[in-house]
Amino acid sequence: MSHDTDPEESTVEWQVARAQAEHGPGFDPDLLTLTLTLYRAMSAFDRAGAAELSGHGLSVSQFNILNVLHRADRPLNMGELALAISIRPANLTSVIDGLVQRSFVERRINPDDRRSYLIANTATGERFLEGFLPSHWRYLEALVWRLDGEDRRALTALLDKLRESIETAQVDRGQVISP
């Protein structure tokens, strides 16, 4: 028996209509529409970034680290770096390990706290960025070609507002702890 997917069933509109029918009049269809649209946009952007970087053997997280360190005026500790790229510090070590193995970044013992490390780009990492970034900016421009400057600024403001909302939500382990 074939379980072919109906293309209509993969649309946001179809999924929202089904959820609304299931959950009744108290259901907020805009919330699910936003969630599905955001996930789809994030996935598409992530796939595009991975495709751009695949020929260079870098992940999106590794590339983000190189860029943050490139723009920083000093080496960063793991906590600062994790915050700058929105990754949990526990997940950062393996990402940094890959960059160290390729000689793109180096770890230095933090002179202010000998229990921690400072991370900095190496000359190899900086040379990579010097050669890669011009084409990267053109690539990003091609990805967002349908958004003019005003759209980009408005979307940036909305996404930042969403991030702040998420980071200040009164939830713990997926459970609402305060309305």
Image (spheres, rainbow, N blue to C red):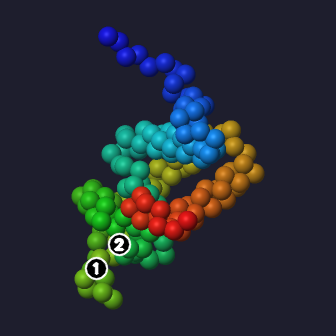
Q: CA distance from mark 2 to mark 1?
A: 8 Å
Left or right, residue 161 beside residue 95 = right
Where residue 78 sits in the image (x, y, percent)? 35, 72
Where residue 140 sits in the image (x, y, percent)? 57, 45
Q: Quadrant of the N terminus?
A: top left
Amino acid at dot 1: Ser
- The one nearer the camera, 23 or 70, is 23
Label 1: which residue?
116
Residue at point 59% right, 58% down? 162
* Res. 17 visible in picture: yes
Q: Give the vertical position of 25 relative to 165 (above or below).
A: above
* Res. 141 visible in picture: no
Q: Find the residue positioned furthest to the bottom.
A: 112
Contact, mark 2 vs mark 1 (Cβ under 8 Å): yes
Where residue 13 sits in the image (x, y, percent)? 60, 31
Left or right, residue 102 beside residue 34 = left
Q: Find the residue positioned furthest to the top.
A: 1
Is the residue marked by circle 2 packed among few (<14), some (14-19), or many (20+) residues within 10 Å? many
Residue at point 69% right, 43% down? 147
- Earlier residue among tags 2 and 1: 2
Label at residue 78: 2
Is the residue marked by circle 1 packed among few (<14), some (14-19), or many (20+) residues within 10 Å? some
Left or right, residue 128 beside residue 40 = left
Label at residue 177: none
Residue at point 32% right, 63% down? 92
Instruction: Label 2, secondary structure: give it.
Output: helix
Q: Give the vertical position of 89 relative to 113 (above or below).
A: above
Q: Give the vertical position of 115 relative to 10 (above or below).
A: below
